[in-house]
Image (cartoon, coloured by chain):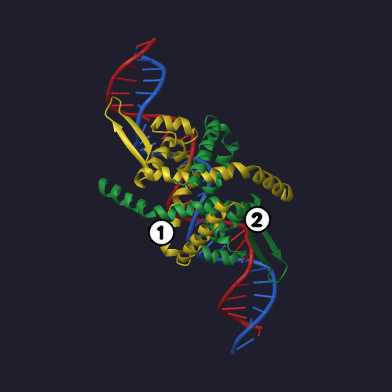
Chain colours: A yellow, B green, C red, D blue
DNA sequence: CGGGGGTGGTCTAGATCAGAGACCATAGAC
DNA sequence: GTCTATGGTCTCTGATCTAGACCACCCCCG
């Protein structure tokens, strides 16, 4: 384990304690910062769209093509949410037909740092996951 | 930006390229490691349960109480999936009634590193997000 | 002996969420 | 005139999530 990783782990434990504060009170889950953000993250397209916007501003249809298997409905919805959360900026150009450009805000860009690490982890351990799945399926099949 | 963060960013860009490889082919999205892992992450309870297991092994009802507002059904389902993915180990003790203990595997523990950073990010920027939301809601209301 | 509580779940019914695809007004290229 | 593209919205259907009843088992308390 690297020094940086140890540092992370310390921070993680701190966060865990802080999460523990809230897990006791289910009703207040909406107030817990971590639950709040985790709900956004746990929304299937959020991360993918943030990642898609990383290289630079993108237009609606461009994003639609880039992500591929998202429906326009979900794309609209997810973008609106990200805009509401201040992660994405939406700019309309009054051309005919109007063009709309989406870009990351500073807040959105800052989120890419932890998200990126998640992707790196995914890439690195994805083989182990597939192997575990095969083992599991063989054992119960 | 710290040196570590710059390092992350380089890695992120690498991953983004690698994601781009797959985003062109929607049909193969299931084959893309990142999409694969992101689908798990985007499942509302997965991260919360991994986090809940971090301090040490937990029994079923213990987890249920700890997380609070998860249904038994979803708890079972999420644990099974994590077990299948090799992130969580399930051990049954043949007592009467049988006790079942869930614990993180090495793979599961390794995932907590990036997840932890996400939590730290959440905690740090959660104020900005709330502010952005208030602004957005005021502007359109 | 008869509850009441705790074990680890499963099952069903209802709510909520996501996806496919039609539709809209507009306009330029063919 | 028709085909494309723009950025969406709308509806219908199917997946997913939740609440809560239920189960077999055992212990403890009376």
- Residue closest to the far front: B3
Residue A30, disc: 1
Check chain identity for marks 2 and 1: say if they share one.
Answer: no
**Secondary structure of the residue carrying numbered label 2:** loop
- The chain identifier of the residue carrying mark 2 reads B
**Secondary structure of the residue carrying numbered label 1:** helix
Residue B138, disc: none
Residue corresponding to mark 2: B105
Disc 1: CA contacts within 10 A as few (<14), some (14-19) or many (>=20): few
Left or right? Give the position of B67 relative to A124: left
Left or right? Give the position of B124 relative to C9: left
Position of residue A128 relative to residue B63, above or below, is: above
User: In the image, residue B131 lies at what x, y percent?
Assistant: 32, 52
User: In the image, residue B76 lies at what x, y percent?
Assistant: 59, 58
- At x 46%, y 30%, the residue is A65
Disc 2: CA contacts within 10 A as few (<14), some (14-19) or many (>=20): some
- At x 48%, y 62%, the residue is A19
- The chain identifier of the residue carrying mark 1 reads A
Q: Quadrant of residue B33?
A: top right
């Amino acid at each position: 384990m690297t020094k940086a990783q140890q540092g992370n782990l310390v921070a993680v434990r701190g966060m865990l304690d802080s999460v523990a504060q809230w897990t006791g009170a289910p009703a207040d889950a909406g107030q817990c910062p971590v639950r709040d953000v985790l709900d956004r993250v746990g929304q299937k397209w959020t991360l993918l769209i943030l990642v898609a916007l990383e290289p630079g501003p993108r237009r609606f249809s461009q994003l639609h093509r880039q992500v591929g298997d998202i429906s326009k409905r979900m794309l609209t919805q997810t973008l609106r949410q990200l805009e509401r959360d201040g992660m994405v900026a939406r700019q309309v150009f009054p051309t005919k037909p109007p063009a709309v450009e989406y870009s990351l805000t500073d807040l959105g860009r800052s989120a890419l740092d932890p998200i990126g690490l998640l992707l790196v982890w995914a890439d690195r351990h994805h083989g182990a996951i597939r192997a575990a799945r095969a083992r599991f399926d063989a054992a119960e099949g």
